[in-house]
Image (cartoon, coloured by chain):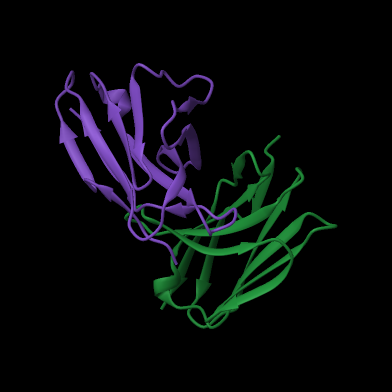
């Protein structure tokens, strides 16, 4: 069993749609990260969360520590949002990565 | 946010040669650097953790003589793939964690290695 599970694995959306990607984890964490990886491979750190909610532009990340669950939302999606979104959790000593959600936004 | 660079961004080499990949923290001191490997359509796999000035800690199954890691300064870590073979072809990513940045890791853009 993976310590971090993401859903869905693949997601196709029309431009402008509201998108939600979910992440559940089974270990005690000190922080949860949402990462974005574009087709070229480079990784960008979007958010680091330990509680509550963070917003950056059209991206919103929430975390519920009691339920061990986090969501990444994208409002007014755009084709340039097409990428793989990876959830990762830190236990302080180790990082565990989800397998990623591949998002394609169609114009 | 903090910036981590990698060099080169891609490299093609012949089987049997060694390849060095650099990971630099550009605007912060990286006390810990991590090296990951990613196969196509798979998640990142941690290879090793290096703390500045000390030997790297390798994950189980990663050959330390094959993947030499050096973290000689607070801004630079290197990964050398020795006697590379086609099965070493992969995407190698480093990340760094440093002073004043809590638990956050900052990722480099990655290096794509192709061994012919």
Image quadrant where residue B74 sits: top left
**Percent x, y of residue A4:** 67, 45
Q: Residue at x 67, y 55 (%)?
A: A31
Nearest the eye: B25 or A16? B25
Q: Is residue B78 left or right of residue B18?
A: right
Vertical order, A88 against B58 (above or below): below
- Chain B's colour is purple
Nearest the eye: A16 or A58? A58
Vertical order, B111 against B102 (above or below): above
* Residue that sits furthest to the left in the current view: B14
Vertical order, B28 against A14 (above or below): above
- Chain A's colour is green
Q: Residue at x 32, y 49 (%)?
A: B24
Q: Is residue A28 left or right of residue A76?
A: right
| Image quadrant containing the C terminus of chain A | bottom left
**Percent x, y of residue B12:** 17, 36
Nearest the eye: B76 or B15? B76
Q: Residue at x 40, y 44 (%)?
A: B94
Image quadrant where residue A40 sits: bottom left
**Percent x, y of residue A38:** 39, 59
**Percent x, y of residue B107:** 43, 53
Nearest the eye: A21 or B45? B45
* Residue that sits furthest to the right in the current view: A66
Vertical order, B104 against B50 (above or below): below
Q: How many marks?
A: 0
| Image quadrant containing the N terminus of chain A | top right
Q: Residue at x 85, y 57 (%)?
A: A66
């Amino acid at each position: 069993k993976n310590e971090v599970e993401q859903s869905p694995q693949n997601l196709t959306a029309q431009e402008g749609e509201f998108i939600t990607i979910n992440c559940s984890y089974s270990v005690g964490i000190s922080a949860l990260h949402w990462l974005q990886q574009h087709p070229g491979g480079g990784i960008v750190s979007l958010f680091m969360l330990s509680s509550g909610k963070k917003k950056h532009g059209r991206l919103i990340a929430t975390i519920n520590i009691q339920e061990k669950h986090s969501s990444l939302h994208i409002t007014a999606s755009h084709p340039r949002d097409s990428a793989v979104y990876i959830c990762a959790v830190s236990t302080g000593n180790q990082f565990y990565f989800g397998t990623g959600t591949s998002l394609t936004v169609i114009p | 946010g903090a910036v981590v660079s990698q060099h080169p961004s891609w490299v093609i080499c012949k089987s049997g040669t060694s390849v060095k990949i650099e990971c630099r923290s550009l605007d912060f001191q990286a006390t810990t650097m991590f090296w990951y490997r990613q196969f196509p359509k798979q998640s990142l796999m941690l290879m090793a953790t290096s703390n500045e000035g000390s030997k790297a800690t390798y994950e189980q199954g990663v050959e330390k003589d094959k993947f030499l890691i050096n973290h000689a300064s607070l801004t630079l870590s290197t990964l050398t793939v020795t006697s590379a073979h086609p099965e070493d072809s992969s995407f190698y990513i480093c990340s760094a964690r440093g002073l004043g940045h809590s638990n956050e890791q900052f990722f480099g853009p990655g290096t794509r290695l192709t061994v012919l």
